[in-house]
Image (cartoon, rainbow, N blue to C red):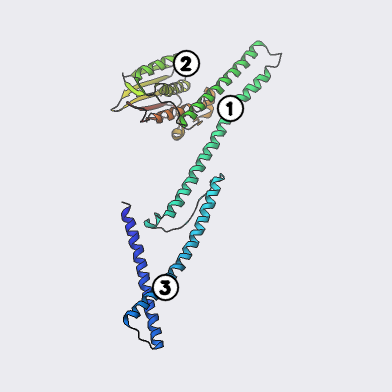
């Protein structure tokens, strides 16, 4: 499909060049005719034709040189702007947007310079977005680390007070222990994300029963949901899949713990496992406060918390869903959310039944 525009472009250029050459020969003809008349000389037709051709080529060459000089100057300015833009990008300034007009029609839009300008602008925009994400990530990490460190420091100083009674001392120590656990979990999650992003995560798909894995993890979390008197409903068909069992355990635990955290006392969590033609589908629904629809697109971002005050009250750093989403990408699966404020939340995980290391 790209060959036809190229041939058309060459044909157009050839036609323009031939027309210009013919125009130069016509000009040459009238010049030589005037000169021959002025000197009263009538050369042979062949000699006259050769003289006209030579002069015509000379006029054509001079014209090409003049036009070429103009375009070389314009090209020089373009290269200067491009090099300056690349220099700014290399120094960390991504506010680059080259603007060069090479034409508006489809053929000219495929000009190499047009593609080069578009590529540089696109690269600058992507690097700017990555830099903004990096700054936001650093800010979030600093906040998540700074908050528990401030608590630990404050209560550690309070423990130096010899007048504290045993009850207060135990309460302060419990808070310090809780904040240390938060820091440890944050560090562990950041390490998991770093390994997943680096694509050095060991990936060992094996064939196992997904229904048994889900039931086992639900029973492991029984103390948490029993403490809140949550009704746990499980409907799991017998289903065998090929996946990394350890990684998928992290996905299910993240989703189950989220359901337990945000489901109020005496609420209900429903977990179902079914099969489509080539996928296993797991639905985990709770009767919690729900998520605003405007947060759907960002809920899997790192450190994003749909309701910061509520998340702070129940704990969490906003990394669990990011880890689950990354693991599902490794498995060529998907994870989606549906929710309404005040009506609970449902996560749907779709996982290929068969997956080998090469596919992941």
Q: Position of residue 3 (x, y in %)?
A: 32, 53
Which residue bears the numbered disc 3?
58
Farthest residue, direction top: 166
Q: For numbered disc 3, what is the local secondary structure?
A: helix
The residue tagged with tag 1: helix, strand or loop?
helix
User: How far apart, in angstroms, are the residues tagged by discs 1 and 2?
Assistant: 26 Å
Please state which of residues 340 and 9 is positioned toward the viewer in this rendering.
9
For the point 38% across and 28% down, the residue is 331
Task: Of the two numbered discs 3 and 1 on the same chain, state the one appearing first in sequence.
Answer: 3
Q: With respect to residue 47, does 260 lie above or below?
A: above
Task: Let me know if residue 337 appears in the view.
Answer: no
**Residue 327 figure quarter:** top left
Q: CA distance from mark 3 to mark 2?
A: 93 Å
Q: In the image shown, does 131 or 288 lie closer to the viewer?
A: 131
Q: Are marks 3 and 2 in contact (CB under 8 Å)?
A: no
Comparing 101 with 219, the one in front is 101
Q: Would you name the residue on which mark 2 appears?
A: 224
* Label 1 or label 2, whichever comes before in sequence order: 1
Residue drawn at x 52%, y 52% as measured from the top left: 83
Quarter of the view holding residue 214: top left
Q: CA distance from mark 3 to mark 1?
A: 77 Å
Q: Badge 1: few (under 14), some or many (20 or more) residues near its Cα, within 10 Å?
A: some
Answer left or right for 95 relative to 172. left
Q: Nearer the viewer, residue 99 or 157?
A: 99
Sequence order check: which comes first, mark 3 or mark 2? Answer: 3
């Amino acid at each position: 499909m790209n060959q036809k525009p190229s041939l058309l472009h060459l044909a157009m250029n050839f036609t323009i060049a031939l027309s210009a050459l013919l125009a130069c020969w016509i000009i040459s003809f009238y010049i030589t005719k005037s000169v021959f008349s002025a000197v009263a000389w009538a050369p042979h037709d062949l000699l006259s034709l050769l003289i006209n051709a030579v002069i015509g080529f000379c006029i054509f060459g001079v014209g090409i040189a003049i036009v070429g000089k103009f375009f070389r100057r314009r090209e020089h300015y373009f290269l200067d702007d491009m090099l300056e833009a690349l220099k700014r990008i290399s120094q960390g300034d991504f506010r680059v947007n080259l603007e060069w007009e090479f034409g508006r029609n489809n053929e000219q839009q495929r000009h190499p310079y047009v593609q080069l300008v578009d590529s540089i602008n696109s690269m600058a925009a992507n690097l700017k977005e990555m830099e903004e994400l990096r700054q936001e990530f650093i800010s979030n990490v600093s906040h998540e680390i700074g908050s528990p460190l401030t608590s630990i420091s404050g209560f550690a100083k309070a423990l130096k007070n010899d007048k504290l009674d045993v009850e207060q001392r135990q309460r302060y120590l419990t808070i310090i222990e809780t904040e240390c656990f938060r820091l440890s979990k944050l560090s562990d999650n950041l390490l998991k994300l770093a390994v997943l992003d680096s694509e050095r995560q060991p990936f060992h798909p094996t064939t196992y029963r997904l229904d048994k894995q889900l039931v086992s993890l639900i029973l492991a979390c029984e103390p948490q949901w029993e403490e809140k008197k949550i009704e746990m409903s499980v409907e799991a068909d017998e289903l065998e899949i090929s996946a990394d069992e350890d990684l998928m355990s992290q996905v299910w635990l993240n989703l189950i713990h989220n359901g337990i955290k945000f489901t109020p006392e005496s609420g209900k969590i429903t977990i179902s496992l079914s099969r489509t033609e080539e996928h296993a589908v797991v639905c985990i629904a709770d009767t919690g406060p729900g998520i605003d629809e405007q947060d759907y697109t960002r809920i899997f971002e790192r450190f994003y918390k749909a309701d910061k005050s509520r998340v702070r009250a129940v704990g969490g750093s906003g990394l669990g869903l990011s880890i689950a989403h990354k693991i599902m990408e490794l498995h060529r699966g998907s994870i989606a959310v549906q929710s309404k404020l005040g009506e609970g939340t449902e996560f749907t995980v779709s996982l290929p039944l068969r997956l080998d290391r090469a596919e992941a």
